[in-house]
Image (cartoon, rainbow, N blue to C red):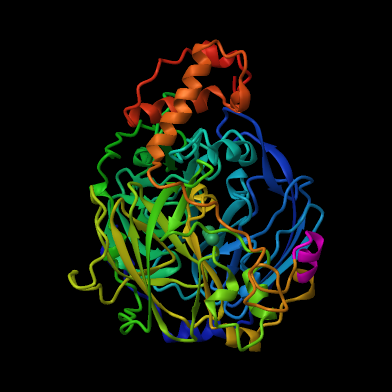
Amino acid sequence: MKASSALPLLTAGLSLLVSSVSAAVRTYDFNVTWVNANPDGLHERQVVGINGQWPLPVIEVDKGDRIIVNMHNGLPDRNASIHFHGIFQNGSTEMDGPVMVTQCPVAPGGDITYNFTVDQNGTYWYHSHVDSQYPDGYRQALIVHDKTFPFDYDEDIFVTLSDWYHETIESIDPSFLSLYNPSGAEPIPDSFLFNDTQNSKIPVKPNTTYMLRIINIGAFVAQYFYIEGHNMTIVEVDGVYTEPTPADILYVHVAQRYTVLFTTKDTTDTNYAIVTVADSDLLDTIPPNLTLNHTNWLEYDSKAPFNEANITVDTSDDLDAFDDSTLIPYDHQELLPDPDYEITVNVSMNNLLNGINYAFFNNITYTAPKVPTLFTVMSANESVVEDDAIYGDFTHTFVLKHNEVVQLVVNNNDGGSHPFHLHGHTFQVLSRSPEYDDFTPFDPNNHTDFNDPPIRRDVLVAHPNGNFVIRFAANNPGVWLFHCHIEWHLFQGLALVLVEAPVQLQQTLQIPDDHYAVCDKVNVSSKGNAAGNSIDFFDLSGQNKQVPDLPNGFTARGIVALVFSCISAFLGMGAIVWYGLSDLSLSEVRMLEHIADDAGIEHEPIDPDDVSNHGGRDD
Ligand code: C2O
């Protein structure tokens, strides 16, 4: 786009005008139920709908507005919740939505009201935050329009990107987190969506500058994004305005948002492809019928040609994509001072004694407490509320003091990339390493200069075997989750909890009665420590615990070999007795075969007919 159209046009007069307009209350009544949908035209399935509809309603508000969502869980068979991703919930941490962190799960037939004001601009989304539910369709854009947006544009539009599964998460989860998936291979999506459909056309006018918000509302897979023949200028990431910065190709990981400006051509003689390419590096296998590249259209003229896109992204090499850590925030907020408190965590994925593959920060895989952590804060005596211990040994909770500067170092001891998200804040991105072949933790005594002013965002990708360093001020009393936004990895426990300024929280927060009623309905205690003990907060007997470690000498590879040789043996015998393997589908056996090949484990080739004789789910 032309640089001139990205010049700031903010004037004092305009902002005065806007601030004199009184804020609105936007009320949404959401009845959550199953509905059927077939967004990729390949498979109809049940999805989580709202008020009988899917795609879900977009929440669109102005800064300063109050959002009230009256949610009724009309799902007959599972719990529900809503998280408003990227909304700071300053003074309203109890409205944040993650189950067993700030609230109880809302039972079938139950109700909860989320009520908070939005004091920020930009591009957000909302999604369920219970039991890996959002990939079942329970996610949609949340947009805060800014009447004082500092850049010149004509039209404000958005697109969502998403991976998509044909099975419900409930039917995928048991085989994902199971002994038969010892390497923790993530379920491979069945397709990819663009605005919850495919092959869509976005009508555009010539000679017009568009503000285009791009939101990855997927569960797992990052996507590359570009528009043929059009230059993009980044102006926002995750609700933070940036110095206008040109980018050819965006890399949008799950939960990330980018807003770009682009200006349309002055002619309408052809239409232009919007190209998305799923990052195949994240996939353990690429099924032959999975299409990674998709084309949607900027439609200048429905009668003009739609020429096939010439797709240039090679997903095995992501060097082309824009590096978000180099962005400059529009407000130039400088690097926060040296930290008062520093947390360093190593990310790993490993098997525990039950053979299942879990994900860890240091040696802890997040295990939900018996009382939501916020309710522990609110029911604890002031003399114990700042002690990490009362929050349990397996929730990985850190207590932060009000207004201290917190530095979080993440060392990724895993060969995959992880999009890490912090609730309640954006954070400054001080440094981020590239991808490495071998684990390379951050070295505090030998590192490049920190970015200054650093970009801020709320989801940052850690590259394979690399590291990043982020900082924020603990100026938002609340209970905030920090986790990998790949829903499979959250399910595997890749999360920790920050209890921020609990004394201030106790003094200022009043949790509404209906949130207590939500706990009563599911028989979850709303007082006590992580174990539900409200007499002695240091007595954690009965707390939920993670599975014990494997004995020394056992390796993940050993488990793969063991499981695989059992399966091969059963298949080889003609498998009259199928034992616990009867729930394996052909695709799962294929996955195991692939894992075994990768690990160099010898085995008999598997005949699909053998498997299909044995009652697998997708036979
Ligand atoms: Cu999009 Cu824990 O959040």
Instruction: Name the spot of residue 385 as percent of width and height, x first.
Output: 60, 82
Write the residue at 57% across / 29% down.
41
Q: Is residue 300 above or below residue 455?
A: above
Instruction: Name the spot of residue 348 as percent of width and height, x first.
Output: 39, 53
Towards the viewer: 182 or 44: 182
Q: Is residue 279 above or below residue 485?
A: above
Quadrant containing the N terminus is bottom left
Towards the viewer: 327 or 445: 445
Question: Position of 395 compared to 277: left or right?
Answer: right
How many numbered discs, if any? 0
Instruction: Name the spot of residue 291 as percent of width and height, x first.
Output: 42, 30
Instruction: Name the spot of residue 527 as percent of width and height, x first.
Output: 72, 74
Quadrant containing the C terminus is top right
Asked if residue 534 shows in the view, the reply is yes
Towards the viewer: 95 or 367: 367
- Residue span colored magenta: 516-524
Asked if residue 66 shows in the view, the reply is no
Write the residue at 56% across / 24% down.
585
Question: Position of 455 compared to 102: left or right?
Answer: left
Give the prevailing secondary structure in the magenta stretch. Answer: helix
Q: Residue 546 is drawn in which quadrant?
A: bottom right
Write the residue at 59% across / 40% down.
173
Q: Does residue 464 belong to the magenta stretch?
A: no
Write the residue at 34% across / 40% down.
281
Q: Is residue 584 above or below residue 482?
A: above
Q: In this view, which residue lies farthest toward the front?
A: 552
Q: Residue 91 is drawn in which quadrant?
A: bottom right
